[in-house]
Amino acid sequence: GRALGELGGSTQGAQRLLAYSDALLSIIATVMILPVAHTKIHPDQELNESVQQLLATKIAVYLMTFLIVTVAWAAHVRLFQVIELIDDVLALLNLACMMLITFLPYTFSLMASFPDVPFGIFMFSSCAVIIGFVQAVIVMYGFQHPYLLNHQIQVSENQAFYKYHILKIIVRGPTLSFVAAIFSFFFIPMSYVFLGLIIFFPHIRHLTKWFTSKTTGREEELPLESFTFYLNEPLSKERVEAFTDGVYAIVATLLILDICEDNVPDAKVVREKYHGHLISALGEYGPNFLAYFGSFVTVGLLWFVHHSLFLHVTKTTQLMGLLNNLSLAFIGGLPLAYQLTSKFAKKSHNEIEAIQVSCVTIFFGSIFQFGIWTAALFYERETLHPYARYGGKEHAFMFAKLALYPCVSLLAFFLTCVLSELSATIFHLMQIIIPFAFLVLRILVRVALVTIKHIMSLSRPREDVLEEEEACLSPPETLS
Amino acid sequence: GRALGELGGSTQGAQRLLAYSDALLSIIATVMILPVAHTKIHPDQELNESVQQLLATKIAVYLMTFLIVTVAWAAHVRLFQVIELIDDVLALLNLACMMLITFLPYTFSLMASFPDVPFGIFMFSSCAVIIGFVQAVIVMYGFQHPYLLNHQIQVSENQAFYKYHILKIIVRGPTLSFVAAIFSFFFIPMSYVFLGLIIFFPHIRHLTKWFTSKTTGREEELPLESFTFYLNEPLSKERVEAFTDGVYAIVATLLILDICEDNVPDAKVVREKYHGHLISALGEYGPNFLAYFGSFVTVGLLWFVHHSLFLHVTKTTQLMGLLNNLSLAFIGGLPLAYQLTSKFAKKSHNEIEAIQVSCVTIFFGSIFQFGIWTAALFYERETLHPYARYGGKEHAFMFAKLALYPCVSLLAFFLTCVLSELSATIFHLMQIIIPFAFLVLRILVRVALVTIKHIMSLSRPREDVLEEEEACLSPPETLS
């Protein structure tokens, strides 16, 4: 798109800045699972109360970080829907903003370790207020240099309206956190309510709006020009994809980091215990490698399902965004599930529990993906490609793809309840076998299609079919 | 581009698959700095021989991983320059390939811990051979379904030539590592030579070709059709950017992870030592926060410089790719530099050494960026936007931007030699001040330009200038 120009060539397309911001935000959201996953638990130790409490605290930090970062990300998406070009000043301001956002996890760690000291919340809210201030400066700067703005806003006569609308969205979070900080000095539980409100306020507001419009039958008044980002308040599809890719990539990579840190045997141990036989020393770690490959396959395929789904999504509504973020929060928990199953791989009281944690994580990760699809079908004319809608030729296959993981994880969960000897090994082997299920699904659909085609056009020459295929390859411009 | 179509809608644009692969590869390359950075060193301990050896081993693993992953990444770029569309089978094969690549760091850890056991190299080469096999299957599959191929190859009569050419590129690495595995049973040093060859072979080959063509004045014969990816063998600019963004993002994020793990005080310590005053307990960590912000600013600005540079790059040659990878390898070392400076923040024998390590890391990271620019200027007609070429209006400013970090880090290094009391605190404050240097540079250039404009066109009305600015905003289609 628009890339260079202006005095000194400082005006630029924002694409790469946004890609970098998405990568940063998705990694910062997900990487906080590491302190949870690395909580020291002895294999023989029961998951007793103190360990559970420690884990619960760390999981709370992870979840708060993840959800707050998604809120910051959503605000960032909104901001750069309005400002479409950047210059050096905006790039530097955006980096300052990113620096403050990456500092947020630390404030959560403080909150979790010192739940009855207001300082953690105070620090969080200071960061939030500064972030809000920097973003407000970005907006003001953008409206002072109108050539940086979205074209529709640039030509609009209501520029002031857009300016205050976007400022309102950006200042919302900081204001709520400021109130939370004030409450933290009197009554801390109230300030946690406000922190929760930061995360769910946009969705609650959206829900109440939807309900009032359904019950009173009256749509809220919009400004004269219908600017696209009001319509169901859609997120930018590209940025949802970029954020999602970042999360999946870091989750897949954290797994090997654990393998490299934990499963390289000590040279001395190998010499003394295994008489220098490295391979037999590594044999000990067999279950860990299996757990690694099983987890990687699961992460990879869940990404694959997401990829297939978003191939047919043409627009992302706010509800789809929320479901996607919830799905990602669970996917981000997979390194913890990996740690548990690989740590308790030997028969122990905790092995079944570890498998159950994995199943629950995978189930919720995938059922929320299914939820995205359901939410998309609700407004299918706006959100889905015709192929994926009811009656489209990809509809059934899409359904099968999305239903596979919820079904399999439920099945595995019930097996752990019924069979007392289901081991982690069998569980990981199941994980590794699943891609073949995808290929079998594909082949079954193919065979069915070919059979139908064969029956319907026995006399048609082959070349026509090829031509038709090629014609299908050209993009459906009206939709993508 | 081309997104949906064919029987069952399985053919897809490869864009998102590539973005995900880039994210995975960049993170896996960089994340291996974590075991290095987390090597336990006591603050009072001299950096003695055993610690230095341990660090050296881990750094070797990091560097080998980084460079091998960049080779795998380059092969992957080549592969998907030939295959431009994917279907579900290719997506799954690619994920299998990624799984094997993310396993490579573990084989390096084994090699580094057991340098005289051939098993590590054997495992590495097995992985490499399987990766090569999977990629070869991808190529065969692509040429069996020609509608997936690059259009130029699709219409070419020399398809078989392209097929064998790309197969040759892909099989090169695995073959070399297979030879290395065989040598590991007889004479291990030789197999390390072959491992090094995997990394540098393409560049050595390129260099010798360049020399022979310069000395004999004869270009190597190319096939009749001049397919673009032969011309200086350029990498895909988008993928270089995506890989780079991934590395910078993970480096910036690893910093806060350290802060969260190391700098949350223990509740008991706060109660007993600081009488419950959290703020005074955190005061202890002041230097760490300063180190964090200093390091983040450095990473952010080095990204900013890279972003500014690539805004003016129109094509990436292989040499530029090599220099970029070398720069990234040093940038990836920044978390280690951060750990050292924050650990030795109190006056100790090692403080100056830690600052020097940081300076050296930053210097090499930025001087290789400068190298990219120099290499680009060498073929400026093909590789640079006119604004950035010699005499272009951005040339001087670009030079200043790229020269800033090498100069500042050199200056800081010399200061550590001259002044004995240069503390880490001053060093980090220097890091934080630098963005203002960028703004000052920008303002100086602005003032100079405005002054010149003012002198040259005193009588010209203001509106014309605005119009000209707007005209500059439209993209120079011929170049971008």
Image (cartoon, coloured by chain):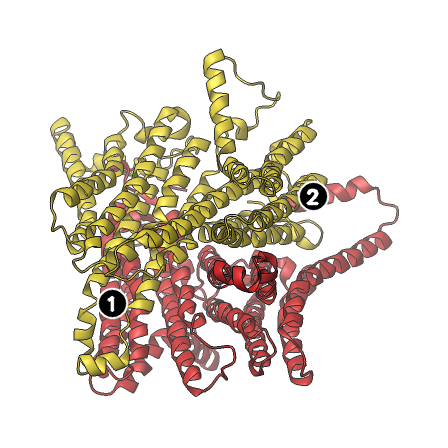
Chain colours: A red, B yellow
Provide residue A243's location: percent of width, then percent of height.
44, 59
- Residues A226 and B318: in front is B318
Residue B339, relative to residue B263: is it above or below? Answer: above
Q: What is the tally of numbered marks visible in this picture?
A: 2
Residue placed under numbered mark 1 in the picture: A127
Residue A38, relative to residue B355: is it above or below? Answer: below
Picture quadrant of residue A375: bottom right
Q: Residue at x 22, y 77 (%)?
A: A119
Quadrant where the N terminus of chain A lies? top left
Disc 1 chain ID: A
Q: Residue at x 34, y 33 (%)?
A: B371
Q: Residue at x 42, y 78 (%)?
A: A55
Provide residue A330's location: percent of width, then percent of height.
50, 71
Q: Residue furthest top?
A: B216
Provide residue B291's location: percent of width, then percent of height.
23, 58
What type is the residue that disc 2 sits on? Tyr
Residue A240 is left or right of residue B49, and the answer is right
| Label of residue B141 in the image | 2
Residue A258 is left or right of residue A193, and the answer is right
Residues beneath discs 1 and 2 located on the same chain: no
Q: Secondary structure at mark 1?
A: helix
What type is the residue that disc 1 sits on? Cys
Residue B415, relative to residue A263: is it above or below? Answer: above
Cβ atoms under marks 1 and 2 closer than 8 Å = no
Disc 2 chain ID: B
C-alpha span from label 1 to label 2? 52 Å
For label 1, the crowd category at 10 Å Cα-Cα, with few meaning under 14, some 14 to 19 and many 20 or more, is many
* Residue B138 visible, this orientation: yes
Provide residue B44's location: percent of width, then percent of height.
23, 61
Picture quadrant of residue B41: bottom left
